[in-house]
Image: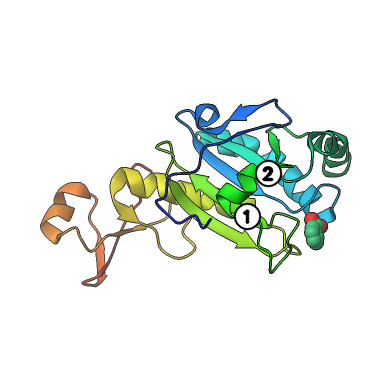
């Protein structure tokens, strides 16, 4: 199954290191980052899980719950957790799904047979509180992800949802944003009382609202 932006995130029930999870119920009103990793006891995955554990307070600040996924069984996850804490200096503090029957992996389309027909690829899904998929990413097995980049995208999603703006290349929190072309100059006067710069009629920038 291919999941596209705007699709309803598939619901599931599956075991995890925090006990059985009914996904939509577990997500509640939060944003969710669901990310798959190829395999327990592998070097890149070990660093990734440590990185996410360290960033958990940043995800929480943004109202985001994090959940990991691989096809390894629960007892493997439980043995691996000690290695993550020992080598990365951070204990696992979010659930890891144990998807041995591939129920979740198949619904999210994270087994790519031309890459590997056994393991999940390195995918990420950002899901909003209405359970819509807002971002998908897939990385190759040998490349660890930037979870700081995910925080940046979540900042952009939450800002653009709230204020009807767009964010430029490499934007980060506090920097100028773009007034979307659908907003006329007349409407912009009301929406953006701090004014804006018109670089081109289609490219108007304004201080980040609410900053
Ligand atoms: C890793 O996490 O280190 C890894 C996993 C699968 C293939 C290559 C590297």
Pick whichever of labels 1 and 2 is earlier in the sequence.
Answer: 2
Residue 55 as seen in the image, left or right of residue 196: right
Label count reads 2
**Image color mode:** rainbow
**In percent of the image, x 62 and y 29: which residue is there?**
21
Residue 113 image-quadrant placement: bottom right
For this rendering, which residue is in front, 198 or 70?
70
The answer to whether the residues at label 1 and label 2 have Cβ atoms under 8 Å apart is yes
Q: Is residue 87 left or right of residue 122?
A: right
Label 1 crowd (10 A; few <14 / some 14-19 / many >=20):
many
**Mark 2 residue crowding within 10 angstroms, few (<14) / some (14–19) / many (20+):** many
Instruction: Give coordinates of residue 153: x percent, y percent.
Output: 49, 52
Residue 60 numbered mark, or none: none
**Tag 2 residue:** 69
Q: CA distance from mark 1 to mark 2?
A: 10 Å
Describe the element under mark 2 as helix, strand or loop: strand
Is 202 positioned to the left or the right of 89 in the image?
Answer: left
Residue pushed farthest left? 186
Q: Height in image: 89 above or below 48?
A: above
Q: Residue at x 71, y 51 (%)?
A: 37
Answer left or right for 95 relative to 34.
right
Instruction: Inspect this view and state whether residue 173 appears.
Output: no
Across and down, in percent, residue 189 comes to 15, 53
For label 1, the residue is 110
Residue 179 on image: x %, y % = 27, 59
- Label 2 CB less than 8 angstroms from ligand 1: no
Residue at the (68%, 33%) spot, across then down: 95
User: What residue is drawn where x is 10% and y is 56%?
Assistant: 186
Asked if one can make out residue 17 in the rendered structure from this viewpoint, the answer is yes
Q: Position of residue 52 (x, y in %)?
A: 68, 43
Q: Quadrant of ligand 1?
A: bottom right
Disc 1, SS:
loop
């Amino acid at each position: 199954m291919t999941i596209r932006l705007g699709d309803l995130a598939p619901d599931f029930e599956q075991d995890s290191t925090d006990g059985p999870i009914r996904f939509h119920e577990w997500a509640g009103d939060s944003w969710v980052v669901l990310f798959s990793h190829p395999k327990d006891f592998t070097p890149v995955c070990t660093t990734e899980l440590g990185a996410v554990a360290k960033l958990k307070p940043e995800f929480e600040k943004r109202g985001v719950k994090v959940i990991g996924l691989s096809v390894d069984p629960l007892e493997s996850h439980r043995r691996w957790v000690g290695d993550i804490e020992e080598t990365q200096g951070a204990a696992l503090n979010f659930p890891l799904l144990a998807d041995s029957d591939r129920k979740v992996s198949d619904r999210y389309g994270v087994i790519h047979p031309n890459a590997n027909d056994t393991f999940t690829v390195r995918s990420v899904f950002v899901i909003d509180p209405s359970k819509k998929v807002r971002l998908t990413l897939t990385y190759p097995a040998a490349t660890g992800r930037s979870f700081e980049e995910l925080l940046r995208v979540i900042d952009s999603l939450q800002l653009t949802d709230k204020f009807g703006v767009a964010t430029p290349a490499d934007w980060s929190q506090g920097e100028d944003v773009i007034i979307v072309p659908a907003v006329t100059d007349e409407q912009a006067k009301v929406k953006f009382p701090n004014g804006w710069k018109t670089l081109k009629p289609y490219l108007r920038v304004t201080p980040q609202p609410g900053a």
